[in-house]
Image: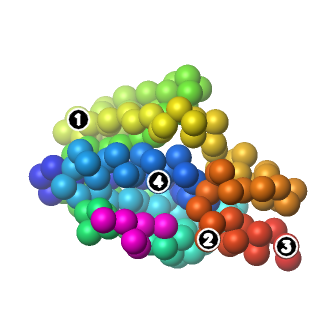
């Protein structure tokens, strides 16, 4: 798929930072495939299907919705990229610690698949502190999630942590 990119992540949960990066990515590429990583060895708050539904709800009324596909994947990201015939991976980087990890992953992916490049995008500066880990902690303790995630994600998180 020429001029397409994969935007992989666990998206557990989807944050405003994720949406900021996605919104900018669709301005750069004709198609962005949001790839929800499902790792059954990790304990997630939301199932893969629930994460896809939350992403779909978040972008359903966006004018650029038709430029986005959303799929689950397991295994090596480069294998999924090859399957989709995409040679660009998009990764969000909020801070230096993110960059160090993502840099190592990009080099590993390049070693395994030299035809696939990684592009790093930074979210808006007001969103750089948001991480799924922090969001889950705030949700667990019943804090205000309104500046971290879309309303429907906050509602879904409250539902998960109220049981």
Say which mark, if any, is on residue 19. Answer: 4
Q: Which residue is mark 2?
A: 152
The answer to whether residue 79 shows anywhere in this view is: no
User: For the point 15% across and 57% down, which residue is it?
Assistant: 1
Q: Earlier in the sequence, mark 4 or mark 3?
A: 4
Do the residues bearing badges 3 and 2 touch, measured as CB atoms within 8 Å? Answer: no
Residue 145 placement (x, y as % from top left): 72, 56
Do the residues bearing badges 1 and 3 touch, measured as CB atoms within 8 Å? Answer: no
Q: Which residue is mark 1?
A: 114
Q: Quadrant of residue 144?
A: bottom right
Q: Earlier in the sequence, mark 3 or mark 2?
A: 2
Q: Calculate the distance from the C-alpha at mark 1 to the C-alpha at mark 2.
A: 39 Å
Q: Earlier in the sequence, mark 1 or mark 3?
A: 1
Q: Report the magenta residues as a range.
A: 58-63
Q: Which residue is mark 3?
A: 162
Q: Report if residue 74 lies within the magenta region.
A: no
Q: Calculate the distance from the C-alpha at mark 1 to the C-alpha at mark 3.
A: 46 Å
Residue 53 placement (x, y as % from top left): 51, 75
> Dot 1: few (<14), some (14–19), or many (≥20) neighbours within 10 Å?
few
> Dot 3: few (<14), some (14–19), or many (≥20) neighbours within 10 Å?
few
Between circles 4 and 3, the one closer to the viewer is 4
User: For the point 56% across and 27% down, which residue is it?
Assistant: 95
Do the residues bearing badges 4 and 3 touch, measured as CB atoms within 8 Å? Answer: no
The answer to whether residue 126 shows anywhere in this view is: yes
Between circles 1 and 3, the one closer to the viewer is 3
Q: Calculate the distance from the C-alpha at mark 4 to the C-alpha at mark 1.
A: 28 Å
């Amino acid at each position: 798929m020429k001029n397409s990119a994969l935007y992989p992540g666990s998206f557990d949960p989807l944050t405003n930072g994720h949406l900021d990066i996605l919104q900018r990515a669709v301005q750069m590429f004709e198609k962005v495939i949001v790839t929800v990583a499902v790792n059954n060895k990790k304990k997630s708050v939301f199932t893969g299907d629930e994460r896809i539904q939350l992403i779909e709800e978040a972008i359903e009324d966006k004018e650029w919705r038709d430029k986005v596909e959303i799929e689950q994947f397991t295994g090596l990201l480069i294998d999924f990229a090859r399957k989709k015939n995409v040679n660009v991976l998009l990764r969000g980087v909020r801070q230096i610690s993110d960059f160090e990890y993502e840099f190592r992953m990009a080099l590993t992916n390049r070693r395994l698949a030299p035809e696939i490049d990684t592009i790093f995008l930074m979210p808006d500066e007001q969103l750089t502190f948001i991480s799924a880990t922090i969001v889950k902690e705030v949700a667990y303790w019943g804090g205000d999630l309104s500046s971290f995630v879309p309303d429907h994600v906050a509602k879904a998180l409250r539902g998960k942590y109220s049981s």
